[in-house]
């Protein structure tokens, strides 16, 4: 019977695993120099497997939807243990800015309908009546998508973990092996270790083909003279670049996200800020009047096939990493899978597709 669990990484995945495992009765230690930070802290908060979907990525869609179904119960339990994580059920609107975009929107709508997903196509005029100030010639309404306030979520997870007795080691892991996790200043004994170190997971196990993918976001706030933020998450593609606007309480708006290869560089570039603001202005012109509150960059943990790595790497070592754009979305299903394996039970549906040895590495 496993008792001692070490979780390497204190982002949304690591904290979710730690909380769920501790609540199930395991003795849990989280190893992270700055828990609750990293890419999870600068995320947009979209829980949107449907509007992220595209032909050829059905495995990621199925796993994301399985996790989405778990989110309401996950959020309710978290609210009791650690505080309100700020779950929003208003859905997503995907906007086409011109006729070319509208054709692509039609492809997405047709695909989603073939896999049984609910979408509604609306005209530009209907869009403006639903979301004043949002521009476009056509849009798709996706009512099943959710969103969460990522920073409220992280604070709630930390509080819930502490409530259930999770211990925190303020250090960086350097090696994970059966029975222990080596750190810069020592080692943490354990019966099972879970690698949830995000973009830095690859250095801890050769099977984890995870690389950093840089993303920049902006946080803005409406002024008295400007339109309020849209009520739903708004997504679009502007000149080939994806843009999203996610409303927050208090008139705030999260704008993201750039995406490019930059190694472990976490600085914010002037080019990234310009691209985001110019793109957002095309979708929601009133954003020009907003106060710019924060600029930030984070490193997504990207895999080569958009699926995360979830499962056993070897005796006493599990992976829970490589979630790309979907770390927040897939936190419930990932945590539930790890706890199921610890309990000797079957994992949730569709998790097997994310096995860490699927790419052939051992």
Image (cartoon, helix red, strand yellow):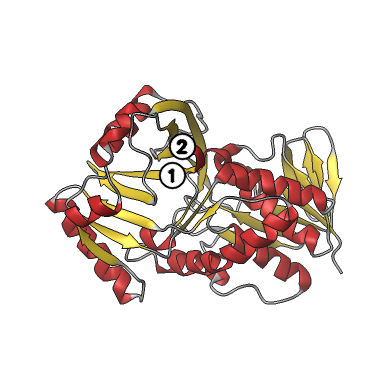
Number of numbered discs = 2
Give the Cα distance between marks 2 and 1.
Answer: 6 Å
Q: Quadrant of residue 282?
A: top left
Q: SS at mark 2?
A: strand
Which labelled disc corresponds to residue 252? 2
Residue 322 placement, left or right of 134: right
Q: Nearer the viewer, residue 107 or 87?
A: 87
Which residue appears at 24% of the width and 64% of the height? 121
Viewport quadrant of the N terminus: bottom right
Residue 9 placement, left or right of 322: right
Which residue appears at 36% of the width and 29% of the height? 272
The x, y position of residue 50, in whole percent, is 39, 63
Q: Which residue is mark 1?
A: 247
Q: Residue furthest front?
A: 224
Q: Mark 2 near mark 1, Cβ–Cβ under 8 Å?
A: yes
Q: Nearer the viewer, residue 358 or 72?
A: 72
- Number of residues whose C-alpha sits closer than 10 Å to that of mark 2, classed few (under 14), some (14–19) or many (20 or more): many
């Amino acid at each position: 019977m496993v008792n001692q669990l070490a979780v390497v990484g204190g982002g949304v995945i690591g904290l979710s695993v730690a909380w769920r495992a501790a609540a199930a009765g395991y003795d849990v230690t989280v190893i992270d120099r700055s828990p609750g930070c990293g890419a999870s802290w600068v995320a947009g908060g979209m829980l949107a497997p449907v509007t992220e979907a595209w032909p050829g990525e059905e495995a990621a869609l199925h796993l994301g939807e399985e996790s989405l179904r778990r989110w309401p119960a996950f959020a309710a339990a978290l609210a009791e243990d650690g505080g309100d994580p700020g779950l929003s059920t208003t859905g997503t609107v995907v906007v086409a800015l011109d006729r070319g975009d509208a054709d692509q929107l039609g492809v997405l709508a047709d695909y989603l309908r073939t896999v049984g997903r609910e979408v509604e196509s609306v005209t530009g005029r209907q869009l403006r009546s639903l979301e004043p100030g949002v521009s476009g010639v056509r849009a798709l309404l996706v009512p099943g998508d959710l969103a969460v306030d990522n920073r409220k979520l992280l604070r709630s997870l930390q509080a819930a973990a502490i409530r259930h007795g999770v211990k925190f080691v303020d250090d960086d892991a350097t090696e994970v092996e059966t029975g222990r996790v080596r750190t810069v200043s020592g080692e943490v004994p354990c019966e099972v270790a879970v690698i949830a170190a995000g973009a830095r997971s690859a250095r801890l196990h050769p099977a984890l083909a995870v690389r950093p993918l840089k993303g920049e976001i902006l946080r803005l706030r409406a002024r008295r003279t400007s339109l309020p933020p849209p009520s739903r998450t708004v997504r679009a593609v502007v000149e080939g670049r994806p843009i999203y606007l996610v409303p927050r309480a208090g008139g705030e708006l999260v704008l993201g996200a750039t995406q490019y290869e930059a190694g472990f560089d976490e600085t914010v570039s002037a080019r990234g800020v310009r691209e985001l603001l110019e793109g957002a202005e095309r979708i929601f012109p009133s954003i020009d009047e907003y106060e710019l509150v924060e600029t930030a960059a984070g490193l997504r943990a990207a895999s080569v096939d958009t699926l995360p790595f979830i499962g056993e790497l070897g005796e006493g070592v599990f992976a829970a990493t490589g979630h790309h754009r979907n770390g927040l979305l897939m936190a419930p299903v990932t945590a539930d899978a790890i706890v199921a394996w610890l309990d000797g039970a079957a994992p949730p549906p569709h998790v097997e597709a994310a096995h860490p040895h699927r790419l052939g590495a051992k």
